[in-house]
Image (cartoon, helix red, strand yellow):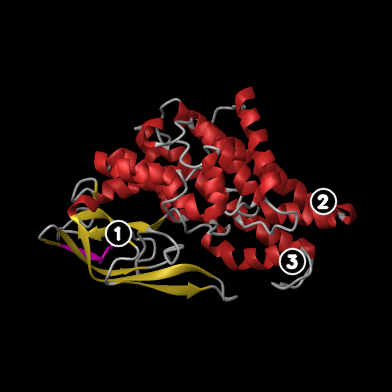
């Protein structure tokens, strides 16, 4: 295990201060923070962030990125999430698509997509989940059939975040039959405005719109939009998931809620409330140190897949725990239209918290990854 104690360097601390100054200048006093990845889709904010070099930080400079270290990116992302900044426009492209293109994309794909991602101008969604499949990613039924010059795609993807707003998504689909479900899968880069593609909203209980169902009806994808090797989709997509498992987004989704509770009620806390906040803060700092240790190990060239799975498991369970504990000790009715920021954020958190342990791999899947890795290491 690589969970070694680590601290930020003076240069990394200066970067943190720079990001905080930027956020103080850009976010209005009455700004309502997003809960982690629930931040608004704000292209203008993403472009301003990119102008400072804080989008596509891990993209090499030759493709327009910052060429930054994993820890430098960790610092920036931590500050953005802690502030509840509106990061949804660039988030998936920056965190997940760009590393996947660097690992598996063609030179032409890198030269076209990566500079646009680093500029905050090209936005991606994820095309993995399907109806009735639950967390069984290998049960893909969306199929791509080879035709002259490309592929025709038919099927359905679900829970596709911001598909109604973004430009592209990387779709996992079946390109050939196979006895082993993990074979015969490929990834295609699909234009979300392509003919034959329909995006339908999946509304939250409060009427909010973040998720979508995407239906393909003979959607044509040219050969030059195949990502990686045909038939290697399972290996590629599992590698891609590793990019989203150990970062600050796995423990900071409810930081805005915790902060609002302390800000609005801290001076009159009773013993139970004080103890609840103390426990939540101590756990937050512990998980943060684990996540930082993974980032530092990535900086040194390690591949901490097991550690990343453990951080995601611990972090998302913590986020759900905080929502329930604060709901209990606050002793308030759930009111999306409440006068206080805490009331509104609590109502939002209660609705969205069940998804925390699903996105990026269910708790059961993550514990299976960790168990296999740990027992394999012992053997």
Left or right: where does residue 145 sit relative to residue 209?
A: left
Q: Which residue is mark 3?
A: 343
Tags 2 and 3 in contact by the CB under 8 Å rule?
A: no
Instruction: Label 1: state its secondary structure.
Output: strand
Mark 2 against mark 3, which lies toward the viewer? 3
* Number of numbered discs visible in the structure rendering: 3
Q: CA distance from mark 2 to mark 3?
A: 18 Å
Picture coordinates of residue 367, whole percent (x, y): 45, 49
Residue 5 appears in the picture as rendered: yes
Tags 1 and 2 in contact by the CB under 8 Å rule?
A: no
**What main secondary structure does the magenta stretch of the protein show?**
loop
Which residue range is magenta in the image? 138-145
The residue lying at 52 percent from left, 55 percent from top is 43
User: Which quarter of the figure is the C terminus placed in?
Assistant: top left
In front of the other: 193 or 78: 193
* In the image, farthest residue toward the top: 10
* In the image, farthest residue toward the right: 268
Displayed quadrant of residue 191: bottom left
Instruction: Label 2: state its secondary structure.
Output: helix
Q: Which residue is mark 1?
A: 190
Mark 2 or mark 3: name the one nearer the start of the chain.
Answer: 2
The residue lying at 47 percent from left, 59 percent from top is 358
Displayed quadrant of residue 287: top right
Q: CA distance from mark 3 to mark 1?
A: 40 Å
Q: Which residue is mark 2?
A: 274
């Amino acid at each position: 295990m690589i969970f070694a104690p680590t601290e930020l360097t003076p240069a990394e601390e200066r970067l943190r201060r720079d990001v905080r100054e930027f956020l103080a200048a850009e976010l209005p006093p009455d700004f309502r923070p997003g809960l982690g990845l629930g931040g608004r889709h704000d292209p203008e904010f993403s472009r301003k962030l990119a102008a400072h070099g804080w989008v596509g930080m891990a993209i090499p400079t030759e493709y327009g990125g910052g060429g930054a270290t994993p820890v430098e990116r960790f610092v920036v992302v931590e500050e953005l999430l802690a502030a509840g900044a509106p990061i949804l426009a660039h988030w998936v492209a920056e965190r997940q698509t760009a590393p996947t293109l660097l690992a598996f994309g063609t030179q032409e794909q890198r030269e076209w997509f990566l500079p646009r991602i680093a500029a905050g101008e090209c936005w991606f969604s994820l095309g993995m989940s399907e109806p009735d499949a639950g967390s069984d990613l290998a049960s893909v039924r969306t199929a791509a059939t080879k035709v002259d010059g490309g592929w025709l795609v038919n099927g359905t993807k679900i829970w596709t975040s911001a598909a109604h707003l973004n430009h592209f998504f990387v779709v996992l689909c079946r390109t050939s039959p196979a006895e082993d479900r993990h074979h015969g899968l490929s990834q295609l880069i699909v234009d979300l405005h392509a003919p034959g593609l329909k995006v339908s909203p999946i509304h939250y209980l409060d009427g909010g719109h973040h998720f979508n169902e995407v239906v393909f009806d003979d959607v044509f994808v040219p050969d030059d939009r195949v990502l990686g090797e045909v038939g290697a989709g399972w290996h590629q997509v599992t590698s891609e998931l590793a990019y989203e498992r150990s970062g600050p987004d796995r423990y900071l989704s409810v930081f805005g809620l915790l902060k609002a509770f302390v800000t609005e009620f801290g001076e009159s806390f009773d013993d139970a409330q004080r103890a609840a906040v103390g426990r939540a803060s101590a756990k937050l700092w512990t998980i943060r140190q684990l996540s930082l240790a993974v980032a530092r190990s990535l900086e040194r060239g390690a591949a901490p897949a097991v550690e990343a799975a453990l951080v995601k498991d611990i972090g998302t369970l913590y986020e759900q725990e905080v929502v329930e504990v604060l709901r209990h000790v606050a002793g308030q009715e759930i009111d999306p239209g409440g006068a206080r920021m805490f009331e509104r954020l609590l109502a939002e958190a209660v609705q969205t918290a069940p998804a925390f342990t699903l996105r990026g791999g269910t708790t059961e899947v993550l514990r299976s990854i960790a168990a296999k890795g740990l027992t394999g290491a012992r053997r």
